[in-house]
Image: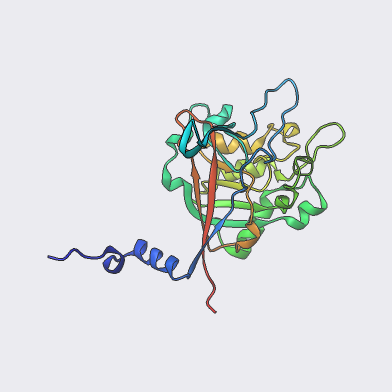
Amino acid sequence: MKSSNANTTATGAAARFIADLGAGRISVIDLTTPLSADTPTLELPSPFANLIDFSLEEVSAYNEPGPYWKHHNIHTGEHIGTHLDAPIHWTTGREGKDVSRIEPARLVGPAAVLDITAEAGDDSDFLVDINHLHAWEAEHGALPHGGWLLIRSGWEHRSGTRQEFLNNDAQGLPHSPGLTGECARWIAEESGLSGIGVETVGIDAGIAAGQQPPFPAHHFLLGNDKYGITSLRNLGKLPPVGAALIVAPLPIVGGTGSPARVFAVLDVPAQ
């Protein structure tokens, strides 16, 4: 008996997806910031401790320590570059999940893109409030259950230098867009979203230390089993609705977060 060829005989949604991908009817867009020693990272003021930046340590390079191969040790903090925040990252989620325990289905879902590039261009401290989400829903429909709210602020264009990306003032205080406390609470407690994604260094605004509660996106989302992704790119290539998000962190046991590769999948418009 001849064995069947799965590529030609398989049916169902997964098979159609593979066929559409191979035929160019679906595109995959990388939303991840390349990770290197130059990737801008969060800087906490004294007396708080900072994570180490990303670096590679050469172990061998086709030489005596390894004549046929090249490999490195990786040195990095969990919350570096494009990364996922897990609930145990924050005090309100301390009894929640580490990265390894987040269900895979929570890391894949529809994407809703909110464009605030004009507002953030005029005001680095711009905050998304509930009225902005309701206005988006009035135009595009309800935010998707099990989906991700991706906030496009234009911040990716600041990623050339750490100074421009962090946007610290003369007193060393950062300025970048984020959420109001009430908006963060609504997303965490009343929406069906799995989480949010941003282009900035963290899921909270630069001025979040002075909000009530402090760092409301972390406080409310991580305390309610919602997740955050940071330092995204290419959100301008996505429509407001219609794309699917795939978030792939390392399943670090006990991990409070992890660098992640993040993809968007969407239909290619018919010619």
Image coordinates of residue 190 in percent, x first then y, are 55, 45
Q: What coloring was used for the rendering?
A: rainbow
Instruction: Specify the quadrant of the image occupied by residue 47.
Output: top right
Residue 43 shows in the view: yes
Quadrant of the image containing the C terminus: bottom right
Left/right of residue 185 with respect to residue 124 in the rendered view: left
Left/right of residue 104 with respect to residue 191 in the rendered view: left
Image coordinates of residue 29 in percent, x first then y, are 56, 59
Determine the residue positioned at 52% across, 27% down: 94
Instruction: Specify the quadrant of the image occupied by residue 125.
Output: top right
* Near-viewer residue (8 or 183): 8
* Near-viewer residue (165 or 130): 165
Image coordinates of residue 183 in percent, x first then y, are 65, 45
The extreme top residue here reads: 47
Determine the residue positioned at 46% across, 46% down: 106
Determine the residue positioned at 53% across, 47% down: 261
The extreme bottom residue here reads: 271
Question: Relative to residue 69, is residue 48 depicted above or below?
Answer: above
Quadrant of the image containing the N terminus: bottom left
Left/right of residue 184 with respect to residue 250 in the rendered view: right
* Near-viewer residue (206 or 215): 206
The extreme left residue here reads: 1
Question: Relative to residue 76, is residue 167 depicted above or below?
Answer: below
* Near-viewer residue (187 or 117): 117
Image coordinates of residue 86 in percent, x first then y, are 53, 35
